[in-house]
Amino acid sequence: MNIYFITNWRVRKSLRLLCRLFLLVLAGLLLFGVSSPLKSLLRRLPGAVASYSYSLPTSFWQGILEAGLPTLVLEAGRQPLPPQPGLVPSAVQVLNPDLVRFLTTEEEYYPLPEGQESPPPPPPADFAPVEEGGRHPLVAIYNTHNAEAYAPSDGTERTPGKNASISLVAAALAQALTEEYGVPVVRSDTIHDYPDFAQAYANSEKTVRRLLAEYPSIQIVLDIHRDAGLKEPPVAYINDQQVAQILIVVGSDARLEHPNWRQNEAFARRLAAKMDELYPGLSRGVRVQEGRYNQHLHPRALLLEIGSSNNTLDQAEKAARLMARVLAEVLRDLQRENPLTQ
């Protein structure tokens, strides 16, 4: 069920304040024993709180620890409303009957308080770009969360401290771009999420900056992830094969400065449109989230969620190879539009 509404970003703080006041009032009602009428009212909502209870399973708290607080998703609509000054067409997606879904909450890097030193950056030896197809790459590929894995194939969702199977998906994408479509690629296999998982994005920002400084020819920057928390694996049937679906995640300026994030969003929509054209069903759409995800470093930097933790590695690698063709065709379109693009 999709509910479309217009979000005015200028009143974000007011909306947050209202939400906090609502939560305080709700807590007060529960504290003073007015919960029974409230529960009765909530039960009348169609399908919204049918499973309401006071107890929460252990898996709920485990999800909180691993992925952060549950959240509703603001997802940009596939059919945007006509543009209006200061307004962003969006959609709230009710994700399941419990109104709760654990997403792969991407930790955003916040500047440390003044006087507090940040952890030392990885030594230069840890920066190991893997070049594919020459010294002038057009695409840069890396993994912020190197430990992400595909449980049906690996027996676990994460392997901390290692390049898990998500790195194999990134490698499959790089190989297909270079060998099948002649697109030069540089890929980093630097581990960013260990030993301090909370510093993963701060670490991968250093990697992206180094790549862009060393290879100014780069036109597209991709951070490869897999989603998590889905009840069923996102699968499409393409060319009589099961392939993992791909979600494009765009960061915004909601938390940190990112004045040009609309350029990243426009490129994301261009990719999604090409996916729909070449391989209907491959795309899960474009999702705009509050994190920045290092996308402020390049106007065509994006985060790709290739499948979820409950997809197989084979499905994810097949999706990556299809995505290679999408990227190659979009790159050629860009070069036709701007012949000076290297």
Image (cartoon, grey):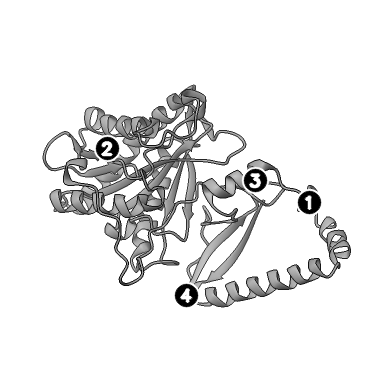
Three-letter residue code for mark 1: Tyr
Element type at mark 4: loop
Element type at mark 3: helix
Element type at mark 1: loop
Of residues 16 and 63, the one drawn nearer to the viewer in this rendering: 63
Which badge, 1 or 3, comes first in the chain's sequence? 1
Cα–Cα gap, marks 2 and 4: 40 Å
Three-letter residue code for mark 2: Asp
Cα–Cα gap, marks 1 and 4: 38 Å
Q: Which residue is mark 4?
A: 86
Three-letter residue code for mark 4: Gly
Q: Is residue 104 left or right of residue 20?
A: left
Q: Which residue is mark 1?
A: 52
Give above or below for 111 relative to 107: below
**Residue 60: numbered disc:** 3
Which badge, 1 or 4, comes first in the chain's sequence? 1
Cα–Cα gap, marks 1 and 2: 44 Å
Query: Where does residue 316 sit, x and y in percent of width and height?
Result: 43, 30
Q: Which residue is mark 2?
A: 189
Query: Where does residue 34 sit, x and y in percent of width and height?
Result: 86, 68
